[in-house]
Image: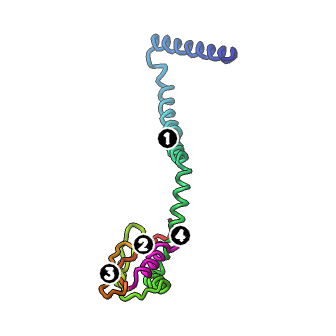
Amino acid sequence: MPPQIAALIEKATAYFKDLFANVVIIYGEKGIEPFKRPLIIAVPSLLILYAGVYSPISDKLTRTVKSIDNMTVVSNYAEEYESVKARVSGLHRRLPLLKDKDDWLSYIINSSAKSAGVSVESQSAQRETEIGSYLVVSREVSTVTTYHKVGKWLAEIENSPIFLIITDLNMQREDSGAGTVKVTLNVSTVFPRGGGV
């Protein structure tokens, strides 16, 4: 500590010791009477000062400290958060638009079957299930075709750029001897209901 500051602290300490000694002497001789008027003025002033300045500042300071602590925790995981957010955004872009929910799945089933050379025999009514801010839509499809065409069709559905998944698949060989199979599958997709990630 520099000698000037040490001297200043020593001088201030001596001054306050002197002041305290004088207050004790006055109190010893005359009692509380000389201190009544300054206390009557000082105590309410200190209470007003505390209520008006210190109390709001302490609340604000507490909130600021909590905010800094929260930001410190967030900053520790910021890179991981950005990575996950980018992956979720990428997955979200693979979901079909909610405005197309009535016809989209049926259209995709029919167009993918046609390109694979499969003739869809029947489709169930569309089933919709709400899960959080998403709508899961599925249809059951039945057809009779060859193993090769079924494999091509399933590959096209599963590798679709828009999210599609086969949630149930049942395949039975036909007795006709022509190498055909009866296939029943459940195709599902997810529509975002909130419009954002």
- Which sits earlier in the primary sequence, circle 4 or circle 2? 4
Q: Position of residue 100 (x, y in %)?
A: 47, 81
Disc number placed over residue 93 in the picture, else none: 4
Q: Give percent across and percent down for residue 156.
A: 48, 77
Cα–Cα gap, marks 4 and 3: 38 Å
Q: Do labels 2 and 1 touch, CB within 8 Å?
A: no
Residue extending furthest toward the left: 175
Instruction: Identify the amino acid type marked 1.
Output: Thr
**183, above or below 73, in the image:** below
Kind of residue indicated by mark 4: Arg
Nearer-N-terminus badge (4/1): 1
Q: Which mark is residue 173?
A: 3
What label does residue 62 carry, if any?
1
Nearest the viewer among 32 and 76 is 76
Which residues lie in the magenta part?
Answer: 145-161
Q: Mark 2 falls on what kind of element?
A: strand
